């Protein structure tokens, strides 16, 4: 294994992790921003007001995007195992 291969392999793994976490992070960002604007407009400074909607929306985003996430993970793992003999050389 060359150093370039190891760096490329790690880069691909990090890109996959970021790609599959993107739907939940994006929804959490949008809900957090919306709740923060609502709090600033109404001057309600309750901490649980931001916490509960974020958790619920991230959970819903996970449920909605779960088939896509599993497809990406299965494809990545299948490619990893199929190319394992090439990696060992």
Image (cartoon, rainbow, N blue to C red):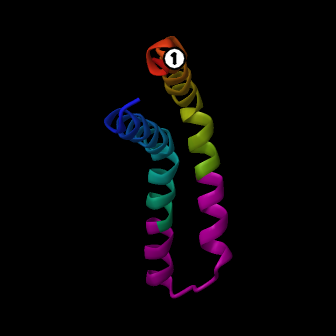
Q: Which of 44 and 19 is in front in this view?
A: 19
Q: Nearer the viewer, residue 86 or 37?
A: 86
In the rendering, at what x and y percent does residue 58 appear? Answer: 59, 51
* Residue 30 painted magenta: no
Q: What stretch is highlighted in magenta?
A: 33-57
Q: Nearer the viewer, residue 89 or 53?
A: 89
Residue that badge 1 annotates: 84
* Residue 41 painted magenta: yes
- Number of residue marks: 1
Residue 59 higher or lower than 35, as above or below:
above
Magenta portion: prevailing SS class: helix
Q: Residue at x 62, y 61 (%)?
A: 53
Q: Residue at x 67, y 64 (%)?
A: 52
Q: Which quarter of the figure has residue 8? A: top left
Q: What element carries label 1?
A: helix
In the rendering, at what x and y percent does residue 5 appear? Answer: 36, 32
Quarter of the image containing the C terminus? top left
In the rendering, at what x and y percent does residue 77 appear? Answer: 55, 22
Pointer 1 local density, CA inside 10 Å: few below 14, some 14–19, many at least 20: few
Q: Which residue is drawn at 40% across and 40% down?
A: 15
Quarter of the image containing the N terminus? top left
Q: Left or right: 62 with respect to 1?
A: right
Residue 34 higher or lower than 42, as above or below:
above
Q: Residue at x 51, y 17 (%)?
A: 84
């Amino acid at each position: 294994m060359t150093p370039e291969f190891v760096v490329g392999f790690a880069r691909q793994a990090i890109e996959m992790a970021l790609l599959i976490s993107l739907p939940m992070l994006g929804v959490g960002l949008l809900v957090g921003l919306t709740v923060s604007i609502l709090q600033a407009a109404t001057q309600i400074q309750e901490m649980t007001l931001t916490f509960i909607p974020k958790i619920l929306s991230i959970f819903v985003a996970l449920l909605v995007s779960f088939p896509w996430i599993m497809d990406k993970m299965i494809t990545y793992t299948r490619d990893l195992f199929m190319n394992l003999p090439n990696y060992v050389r």
